[in-house]
């Protein structure tokens, strides 16, 4: 399956990946409306990690043998056998934080509500995820990777 | 005759079915389960009480899980006898199910100490959906509840009852709540949040006697503590802990300790017989010993390992440890490994405590390897620490970074970061 690969050496730490992830997961899909009018503002599912001079963006890796899927208490986290995506069903999520405990990348976030988690869905409705498309320096690459 | 027979259909049983089908699409699987309702998440029964979850939401697998996995499910049936010589499990009613390979995933049962009056109406345990269903019918008419035991189950049911408007007293024998998972500082943060909701916490005491109501002695009316104090109440929930359900293996060659003894393949001392979940004593990678750890994610994982091995795909269990994520009373906590190390020079403790923000991070190190962690409120990067623990990473050079506010993959040394990130 295709995965997002971060190129640390190309990342400028601008944070546009987070901005466009927020927009993509907003109701309006419009940057101004998402930031100014949606309360609470949707969180970004990609996380820009910075420790100057190092920076890179990290999001759910959609692991082959995903620890969050095995650990999930409610059945909200699933591995889609066809697409390879690790999917999160917000309706089923009980906000127990067990997935956060076992994710080696620290890639799962608490949603704005503080009651469930949120994570990268690889923008399944787009051909290329929003963070990749909008990275100005090619620091995020979407490509076929062996599991 | 069934190729695979699984006794128990909770986390470990489900995990085993999925793993077996991963490897063997055709071998016959029979699952025996006492419970009639579909696969549901037991840790969610407190959400059922609070009103946050319906049974529909609690289902952790599709409705057609048995059919999809081509499983013969004997639900509402109890396995009463195990014959290892002739390789069969006998059910209530006398039916026999013969097996080639057997998984014992019978789970745990609530430990009920000898308390006078524990047989009265409205005394509950709280581990299964049926317990929650029975308790739910009593909530409308009840005003006060006493919860005995402030572990995970006790705290979860306390929160749920408080949300339903009951006046709850939680009684804990140890000197603090969640004493197995948290140290004093973290426990105090939770205790403060609990008290804010009006729940009364009594520590250093337990309930020695359950009283009846003046008008009907068979129905709960109060509880008497070890110090003699009386608490008026309409419900008592006993949540002291769970013990492995080992009735089936009593008198057989299956070796047991506190739970059923298994090797790293979740195999018992008897050929072709496996055990997983709360009934088994599986490997703890922090304590480097096998022990009973009744936790849902570990049960699921152990069940998967057993399933793979039963189906012929040799798979090691990497081990678990005491590990819990908590959401109760609005305080997110992740606690893994040793929370309360012995006062010993061998352990190094790193702590960051911001009491104004209720932020608390503690790491317990031994020889520069993390053997315990507790994160309160700021928990999103806890999984990275767990990864370092599982892989016994020497953190000497960057240990202070681990409890910093900015902690993340970017604060790890470059080589280590790239290893985790690229997975090589």
Image (cartoon, grey):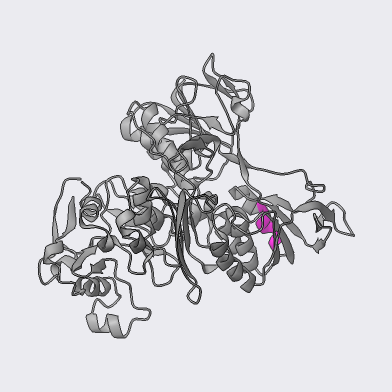
Q: Viewed as shown, does residue B150 lie left or right of A18?
A: right
When asked about the image quadrant of residue B80, the answer is top right
Q: Is residue B327 magenta?
A: no
Q: Is residue B138 magenta?
A: yes
User: Which secondary structure class fits the magenta region best?
Assistant: helix
Given the current orientation, which residue lies at the most extreme right position? B215
* Whether residue A78 is situated above or below residue B379 in the rendered picture: above
Indicate the quadrant containing the C terminus of chain A: top left, top right, bottom left or bottom right: top left
Residue at x 58% of width, y 66% of height: B188
Q: Position of residue B136 (x, y in %)?
A: 65, 58
Q: Position of residue B175 (x, y in %)?
A: 66, 58
Q: Viewed as shown, does residue A61 lie left or right of B70?
A: left
Along the line of sight, which residue is nearer the eye, B126 or B114? B114
Give the magenta-colored segment's residue range: B134-139
Residue at x 34% of width, y 78% of height: A41
Given the current orientation, which residue lies at the most extreme front position? B345
Along the line of sight, which residue is nearer the eye, B226 or B59? B226
When asked about the image quadrant of residue B108, the answer is top right
Q: Is residue B70 visible to the viewer in this orientation of the structure?
A: no
* Whether residue B400 is situated above or below residue A65 in the rendered picture: below
Q: Position of residue B99 (x, y in %)?
A: 47, 21
Given the current orientation, which residue lies at the most extreme top position? B85
Q: Is residue B190 visible to the viewer in this orientation of the structure?
A: yes
Count of numbered badges drawn on the protein:
0
When asked about the image quadrant of residue B168, the answer is bottom right
Q: Viewed as shown, does residue B81 lie left or right of A138?
A: right
Q: Position of residue A127 (x, y in %)?
A: 15, 62
Residue at x 87% of width, y 56% of height: B216
């Amino acid at each position: 399956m295709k995965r997002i690969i971060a190129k640390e050496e190309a990342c400028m730490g601008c944070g546009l990946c987070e901005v466009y992830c927020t927009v993509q997961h907003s109701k309006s899909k419009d940057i101004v409306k998402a930031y100014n009018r949606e309360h609470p503002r949707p969180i970004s599912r990609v996380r820009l990690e910075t420790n100057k001079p190092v920076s890179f963006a990290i999001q759910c890796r959609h692991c082959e043998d995903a620890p969050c899927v095995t650990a999930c208490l409610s059945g909200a986290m699933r591995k889609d056998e066809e697409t390879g995506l690790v999917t999160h069903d917000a309706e089923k999520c009980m906000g127990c934080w067990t997935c956060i405990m076992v994710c080696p990348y620290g890639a799962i976030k608490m949603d704005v509500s503080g009651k469930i988690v949120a994570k990268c869905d690889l923008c399944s409705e787009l051909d290329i995820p929003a963070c990749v498309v909008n990275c100005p320096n090619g620091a995020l690459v979407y490509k076929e990777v062996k599991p | 005759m069934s190729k695979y027979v699984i006794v128990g259909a909770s986390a470990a049983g489900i995990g085993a079915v999925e793993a077996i089908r991963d490897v063997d699409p055709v071998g016959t699987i029979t699952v025996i389960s006492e419970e009639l309702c579909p696969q549901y998440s037991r840790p969610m029964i407190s959400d059922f009480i609070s009103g946050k979850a319906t049974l529909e939401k609690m289902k952790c697998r599709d409705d057609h899980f048995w059919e999809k996995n081509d499983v013969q499910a004997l639900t509402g049936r109890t396995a009463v006898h195990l014959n290892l010589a002739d390789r069969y499990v006998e059910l209530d009613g006398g039916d026999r199910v013969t097996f080639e390979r057997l998984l014992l995933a019978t789970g745990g049962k609530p430990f009920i100490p000898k308390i006078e009056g524990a047989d009265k109406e409205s005394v509950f345990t709280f581990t299964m959906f049926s317990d929650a269903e029975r308790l739910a019918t009593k909530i409308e008419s009840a005003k006060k509840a006493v919860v005995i035991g402030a572990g995970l189950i006790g705290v979860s049911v306390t929160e749920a009852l408080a949300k339903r408007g009951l006046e709850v007293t939680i009684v804990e024998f140890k000197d603090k709540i969640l004493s197995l998972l948290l140290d004093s500082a973290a426990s105090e943060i939770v205790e403060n949040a609990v008290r804010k909701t009006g729940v009364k916490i009594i520590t250093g005491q337990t309930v020695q006697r359950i009283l009846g109501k003046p008008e009907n002695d068979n129905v709960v009316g109060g509880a008497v503590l070890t110090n003699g104090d009386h608490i008026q109440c309409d419900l008592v929930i006993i949540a002291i802990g769970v013990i492995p359900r080992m009735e089936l293996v009593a008198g057989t060659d299956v070796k047991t300790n506190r739970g059923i003894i298994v090797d790293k393949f979740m195999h018992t001392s008897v050929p072709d017989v496996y055990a997983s979940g709360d009934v088994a004593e599986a490997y703890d990678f922090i304590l480097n010993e096998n022990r009973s750890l009744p936790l849902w994610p570990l049960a699921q994982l152990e069940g998967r390992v057993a399933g793979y091995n039963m189906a012929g795909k040799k798979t090691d269990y990497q081990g678990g440890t005491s590990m819990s994520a908590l959401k109760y009373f609005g305080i997110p906590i992740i606690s893994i490994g040793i929370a309360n190390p012995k006062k010993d020079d061998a352990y190094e403790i790193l702590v960051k405590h911001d009491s104004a923000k209720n932020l608390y991070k503690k790491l317990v190190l031994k020889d520069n390897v993390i053997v315990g962690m507790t994160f309160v409120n700021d928990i999103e990067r806890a999984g990275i620490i767990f990864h370092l623990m599982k892989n016994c990473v020497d953190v000497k050079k960057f240990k202070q970074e681990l409890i910093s506010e900015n902690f993340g993959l970017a604060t790890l040394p470059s080589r280590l970061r790239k290893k985790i990130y690229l997975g090589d």
